[in-house]
Amino acid sequence: MSNATNEKPYYPALDGLRGIGCLLVVVYHNFWFLQRYLFFGWLAMDIFFVLSGFLITHILMNSMGRKDYLRNFYARRILRVFPLYFTLLAVFLLVLPNIRNLPFRMDYFVNHQIWFWTFTQNWILIFRSPVNQNALNHLWSMAVEEQFYLLWPLVVALVRRPRVLLAMLGVLLVGFSCFRLWLWMQHIDGFAYYNFYLFTRIDGICIGCMVALLQKIDFRFLERYMAAIVLGFAGINFIFYYINLHNSDSYPYLGLIGFSTFSMIFGLLVNDITRRRTKIFSTLFDIPFLKFIGRISYGTYILHWPLYLLLNLAVQHFLARYMAGGVAQFLTSTIITVAAYGAGYLSYRYFESYFLNLKTKFG
């Protein structure tokens, strides 16, 4: 790939990777009764975080110095995220609570809605977690991303030098791992050090940013040092396993190194895709179906879980008249999953695309 091609902020195969992430997260949620077999479906969020960090940093570094590039960045981000997100909040926080006999409760989200309107819900979901309510819990990831992207472009604009930015991200990764260890030692609730906080799920975003910076500094750096990087992370995992083995497996793997390790794998995969080094990856992620799912992934992710809660009981009760309960449950999840992708397509085609087209006014 030429340098000119490298400056292009859109890599079609990344839509394929995003599509796999979308498939994983929707199946993980909608087929919750199979989570013992689908445990690693939650990794889809780290795929999204790595992709976001890479693409945003790639855009910022390549547009730096152009007129109004920060204004354009924020305007384009708003047009991509805000319309559908705030429409969903308006429906679920302002309209649906006035309807009787909803199949799920919404009082927690209504009472704490200011956190959702301001993209800070990842904090309230920890400090005052809902009981028997989860209609909007999946929006925690939106808060993590938007908080990071509020600050990161400003840091990039102030620092400007890729090597310094890379070093800062490395310090952040190590610092957050140490902080999570401290939280664990203070006996803070488990979610506090491995789930919703910005500093507990920032590993993927940081590593995605680091991949983009490394490509800017030396486009072939990761290719040359791939073996050393993989062996280094493997060594870290081995050391952790050895320490944990002699401490009754008491240390939280994900909270301390797991998120970084998995995100590193996804970061190397993103680098490989954008460099088109491995034919099997290029072929896999260029599959039209996966790229299609990737393009509609935002709407699908935002809508899939509320849609499941709205339809689940009615569809399952209907199907239970004609088949066994377990079969009815599986078929219900299958039908609603297909409906979620349909809703994602309709959202992308007839709602999101209007605002996406407006992005051309901002660079």
Image: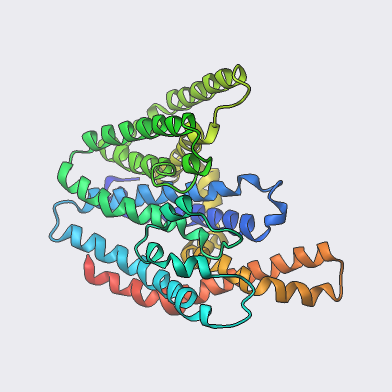
Choose between 239 and 221: the one closer to the eye. Answer: 239
Nearer to the camera, 185 or 155: 185
Q: Residue 75 lies in what quarter of the image?
A: bottom left
Q: Is residue 133 above or below residue 44?
A: below
Q: Residue at x 56, y 50 (%)?
A: 284
Q: How is the image coloured?
A: rainbow
Residue at coordinates 82% horizontally, 72% vertically from top-left?
Answer: 320
Q: Count of labels shown?
A: 0
Q: Locate residue 341, reporting x and y percent.
A: 58, 69
If the image is split into quadrants, where does the N terminus sit? top left
Closer to the camera, 50 or 105?
A: 105
In the displayed structure, 205 sits above or below 299; it is above
Query: In the rendered image, is residue 12 in sight?
Result: no
On the image, which quarter does residue 84 sit in? bottom left
Q: Quadrant of the C terminus?
A: bottom left
Q: Which residue is at 37% across, 73% downward?
A: 83
